[in-house]
């Protein structure tokens, strides 16, 4: 068994790809390719913004539904079994809306960050 720095170097070279192979880049992009990539990213940001709005709307609807179910559970004309089922359903809906609300806030924050990065890089500024 070989020891020492040269043996270590030979062992590493046997397992690691050459630097040129690892660092070889695809050809230089042409103007139309760059334009298509920018348009694709713009579409992604716009759809992400729509997704954020939909997530916020879903949270609002879930809260309204939970409130309506809870009110239905407290109606005098509903028997105990149905009332308990509706109360449990309302609790589940409230929990789901709470989780979705936190998710929507995180999504909004990410969407704002991505939009800010795009705007600052369009102006030639560093987003950091």
Image (cartoon, rainbow, N blue to C red):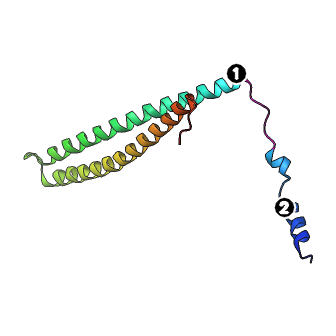
Disc 2 from disc 1: Cα separation: 39 Å
Question: Where residue 48 appears, x then y in whole percent?
Answer: 48, 34
Residue plotted at (23% across, 45% down): 66
In this rendering, position of residue 33 left or right of residue 40: right
Highlighted magenta segment, given as a residue range: 24-30
Question: Where residue 7 appears, x then y in whole percent?
Answer: 90, 70
Secondary structure under the numbered disc 1 in the rendered image: helix
Q: Earlier along the polypeptide chain: callout 2 or callout 1? A: 2
- How many numbered marks are there? 2
Q: Nearer the viewer, residue 8 or 90?
A: 8
Q: Is residue 63 magenta?
A: no
Secondary structure under the numbered disc 2 in the rendered image: helix
106 vs 120: above or below: below
Q: Nearer the viewer, residue 63 or 23?
A: 23
Query: Where is mark 2, residue-wise?
Result: 15
Query: Where is mark 1, residue-wise?
Result: 32
Q: Is residue 25 magenta?
A: yes
């Amino acid at each position: 068994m070989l020891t020492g720095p040269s043996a270590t170097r030979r062992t590493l070279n046997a397992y690691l790809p050459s630097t040129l192979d690892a660092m070889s880049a695809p050809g230089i992009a042409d103007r139309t390719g760059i334009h298509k990539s920018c348009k694709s990213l713009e579409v992604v940001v716009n759809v992400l913004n729509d997704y954020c709005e939909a997530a916020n709307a879903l949270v609002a609807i879930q809260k309204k539904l939970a409130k309506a179910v809870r009110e239905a559970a407290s109606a005098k004309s509903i028997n105990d079994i149905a009332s308990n089922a509706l109360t449990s359903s309302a609790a589940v809906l409230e929990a789901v809306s709470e989780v979705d609300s936190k998710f929507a806030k995180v999504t909004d924050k990410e969407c704002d960050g991505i939009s800010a990065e795009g705007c600052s890089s369009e102006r030639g500024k560093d987003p950091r």
